[in-house]
Image (cartoon, rainbow, N blue to C red):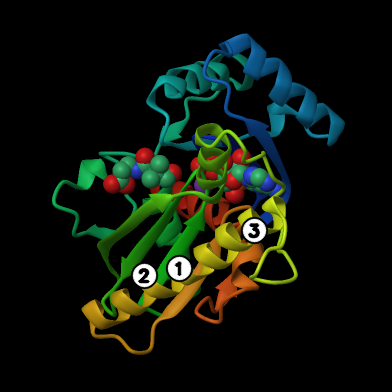
Amino acid sequence: MILVVDIGNTNIVLGVYRGRELLHHFRLSTARQSTVDEYGVLIHNLFHMSNISFKDVEGVIISSVVPPLVQVIVEMCVKYIGKDPLLVGPGIKTGLNLRYENPREVGADRIVNAVAAIEQYKCPLVVVDFGTATTFDCIDAGANYLGGAIVPGLGISTEALYQRASKLPRIELEKPKKVIGRNTVHAMQAGIIFGYAGQVEGIVRRIKLEMNAPVLKVIATGGLAPLIAGETDCIDEVNPMLTLEGLRIIYNRNK
Ligand SMILES: Nc1ncnc2c1ncn2[C@@H]1O[C@H](COP(=O)(O)OP(=O)(O)OP(=O)(O)O)[C@@H](O)[C@H]1O
Ligand SMILES: CC(C)(CO)[C@@H](O)C(=O)NCCC(=O)O
Ligand SMILES: [K+]
C-alpha cells in the first residue's frame, strides 16, 4: 500500500492505494497549529477505523501548497509510519514540461492535477480545481503545461460577502431555483453560483481562443466541482479523485 497526501489551504486529503486501486480516502481540515503528534493520532485513528495499519504502508508521497505544514507532516510520516516521504517539488520526476516563467512557483497541486489529467485524457486539455482558490491549468496538444488562471474560490468569495457587508449573512452554497432572488439568501446564492459558472465559461472561452484549440477537454475536480459543472456545459467531466491519482502516478515514476 502507498499513502498519498495532498496538503491544501482548507483540507488535507489522504488516499491509500493498493496498486491502482484507491482503497480509502480521508479529509482533514488544514490546522496550521496542529503538531506532529496530533496529526499522528488523527491519521492513526482513521487507519484503525478502516482496518488498515501503518505497517502495511510501503511509501508516502506528499504535495503541499502550505509550506509551514510540510515539515510537520514529513515528521509525522517518519515518526509514526517509519517512512521518509517523497515531496512533490524540485528534484522529483513528474514527466511534466513546465512552461511557467519560474517552474518553482507553480503550486504542487496544479502540477499533480496536470500529470493525472495527461495520463487519463487526450490533450489539449484544461483542469479546473475548485478548492480554496479555483485554478485553471492549461495543457497543450504536446502535453506541455502552459500555465493558467487563479481566481478566488467559491468558499472565499461567499465568505467575503458575509465578512464585508453587515447585512449579508453566511449562506449555504446551494443552487437557488431562480436567478432573480427575492430574498437576501437567494440573491446571494444566485450571484455566487450562476456568477461563478459564468466566470468559468468566460475563462475557458478565452483559453480556447488563446491556445487556438476550439476542441479542448475540460476536466473539473475539487469538492465544489459537481455544483458548478451542473450549471455550465463548458465542463466535460468531473473527476473528484484527480489529485490523488496524480500523486499515485508521480510516486510510481520515482520509486
Ligand atoms: N457547502 C459549502 N458551503 C460553503 N463553503 C463550502 C462548502 N463546501 C466547501 N466549501 C468551501 O469551498 C472551498 C473549497 O472546498 P473544497 O473542499 O472543494 O476544496 P479543498 O480541497 O478544501 O481545497 P484545498 O485543496 O485548497 O484545501 C473551501 O474554502 C470550503 O470551505
Ligand atoms: C493557487 C493555489 C493556492 C491552489 O491551491 C496553489 O496552487 C498555490 O499556492 N499555487 C502557487 C502559485 C501558482 O500556482 O502560481
Ligand atoms: K485541492
Q: Quadrant of the C terminus?
A: top left
In the picture of the structure, the residue carrying the numbered disc 3 is: 187
Quick check: marks 2 and 1 in contact, CB under 8 Å? Answer: yes
- Residue at 30% x, 74% y: name it: 207
**Which residue has dot 2 on it?**
203
Answer yes or no: do the residues labelled 1 and 3 have beta carbons within 8 Å? no
Q: Which amino acid does label 2 sit on?
A: Ile
Front position among marks 3 and 2: 3
The amino acid type found where label 1 is placed reads: Val
Q: Do the residues labelled 3 and 2 touch (CB within 8 Å)?
A: no
Q: Is residue 14 left or right of residue 94?
A: right
Q: Nearer the viewer, residue 206 or 193?
A: 193
The percent coordinates of residue 246 (x first, y second) are: 49, 55
Question: In the image, ligand 2 is in what quadrant?
Answer: top left
Place residue 65 in its image quadrant.
top left
Q: Which numbered disc, 3 or 2, marks the residue that appears first in the sequence?
A: 3
Instruction: Give, as a three-letter code, the residue at label 3.
Output: Ala
Rendered view: 137 above or below 37: below
In percent of width and height, residue 39 lies at: 63, 19
Q: How far apart are marks 3 and 2 (CA)?
A: 23 Å
Query: What secondary structure is marked by label 1?
Result: helix
Residue at numbered disc 1: 200
Whether residue 206 is visible to the viewer of this picture, yes or no, is yes
